[in-house]
Image (cartoon, rainbow, N blue to C red):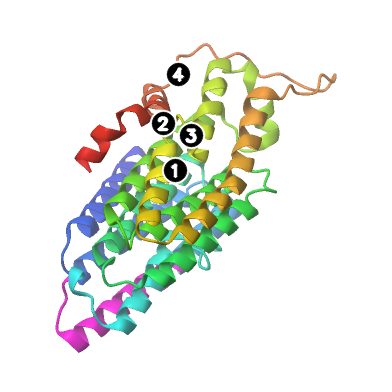
């Protein structure tokens, strides 16, 4: 793709995201979401492969439907209350429609069907954008409207997302699909807490974005799209593969790594809010996710490939690891000890 075109799309993504997260008026927020959708479509379909075109079409249809629902929800609220302010969403029908619209935007169950397919049709870098940056505006809208939304609906969606995200990721062999189901599962953790502690949901999103970026960039530098490829990459970058093991365990939420922090705080907050049953269920469902992260880690680090005559080992890569990968990986592993500082800032 032309570098000038790439620059325009990157600037459009930045503009759309900034517009949505900084606006008070529904129309401005909707405009930002639309700019984001239109800017990411050429990036998804740039390879001109039929699967990429299919992914871009699916993404466009789902996002257009969700944007229409956001607009319909805000107009219904303005019709009944005379308010266009995002934080003044009070009409019950508008709240319900907005919950559905944002669930579609994010890929929460039962509106998750598009996300694994779109991620599978995109490159790893575009997949990273779809999993992190493109979810920031809808999460912000969810944060701003959280006092108006029904906790029971969000909790049901959250538990279903954690269950299906973990369960459907078990049988996958494509790394992008595994990371898509991992994203759905993590969104469940954000949705369950957003009605009780919106700041905690945002903290979870930031830390999830950090860890996912580290995994995506690591996989991109070793060019691993399938588990079978991942098994043979240890000869290429042994040190990166070894650290990828720890990053994946952090994403699974094991102590003493960074990923344990949001899960620990969410379970603590849910127990304080007297919804200990939901906390227990979602904690148990995270074991499903742990299984496929362990599978990824096992393929990346512990498995030796078969020594057959037609098997080719990859050449050892002598280039230094990307600085961004190094910084993100370090943060994905080391932030738990400074959690009091993080909590003071949040």
**Image position of 253 (left or right of 326):** right
Where are the magenta residues, as a range?
A: 62-85
Q: Earlier in the sequence, mark 2 or mark 3?
A: 3
Determine which residue is flagged by label 3. Answer: 250
**How far, Cα to Cα, is label 4 from label 2?**
16 Å
Determine which residue is flagged by label 1. Answer: 128
Point out the frontmost of discs 4 and 2. Answer: 2
The residue positioned farthest toward the top in the image shown: 318
Q: Main secondary structure of the magenta part?
A: helix
Determine which residue is flagged by label 4. Answer: 321
Cβ–Cβ under 8 Å for marks 2 and 3: yes
Cβ–Cβ under 8 Å for marks 4 and 1: no
Depth check, front residue: 310 or 139: 139
Residue 225: percent from the left, percent from the top?
Answer: 61, 38
Determine which residue is flagged by label 2. Answer: 332
In terms of image quadrants, where is residue 152?
bottom left
Secondary element under disc 2, as helix, strand or loop, is helix
Depth check, front residue: 202 or 326: 202
């Amino acid at each position: 793709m032309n570098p000038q075109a790439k620059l325009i799309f990157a600037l459009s993504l930045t503009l759309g995201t900034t517009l949505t997260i900084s606006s008070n008026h529904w129309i401005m927020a909707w405009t930002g979401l639309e700019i984001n959708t239109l800017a990411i479509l050429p990036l998804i379909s740039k390879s001109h492969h039929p699967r990429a075109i299919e992914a871009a079409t699916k993404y466009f249809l789902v996002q257009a439907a969700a944007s229409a629902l956001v607009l319909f929800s805000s107009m219904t609220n303005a019709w009944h209350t005379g308010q266009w302010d995002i934080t003044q969403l009070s009409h019950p029908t508008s709240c319900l429609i907005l919950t559905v619209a944002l669930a579609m935007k994010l890929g929460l169950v039962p509106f998750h069907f598009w996300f694994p397919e779109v991620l599978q049709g995109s490159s790893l870098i575009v997949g990273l954008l779809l999993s992190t940056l493109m979810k920031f505006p809808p999460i912000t809208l969810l944060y701003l409207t959280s006092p108006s939304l029904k906790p029971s609906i969000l909790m049901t969606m959250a538990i279903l997302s954690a269950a299906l995200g973990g369960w459907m990721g078990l049988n996958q062999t494509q790394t992008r699909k595994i990371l898509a189901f991992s994203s759905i599962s993590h969104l469940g953790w954000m949705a369950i807490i957003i009605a009780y502690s919106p700041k905690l949901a945002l903290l979870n999103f930031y830390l999830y974005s950090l860890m996912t970026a580290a995994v995506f960039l690591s996989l991109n530098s070793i060019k691993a799209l399938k588990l079978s490829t991942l098994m043979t990459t240890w000869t290429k970058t042994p040190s990166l593969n070894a650290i990828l093991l720890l990053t994946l365990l952090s994403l699974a939420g094991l102590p003493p790594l960074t990923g344990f922090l949001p899960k620990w705080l969410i379970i603590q907050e849910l127990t304080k809010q007297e919804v200990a049953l939901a906390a227990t269920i979602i904690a148990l469902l995270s074991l499903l996710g742990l299984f496929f992260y362990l599978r990824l880690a096992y393929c990346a680090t512990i498995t030796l490939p078969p020594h057959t005559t037609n098997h080719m080992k990859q050449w050892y890569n002598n280039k230094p690891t990307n600085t961004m990968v190094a910084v993100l990986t370090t943060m994905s592993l080391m932030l738990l000890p400074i959690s009091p500082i993080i909590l003071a800032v949040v």
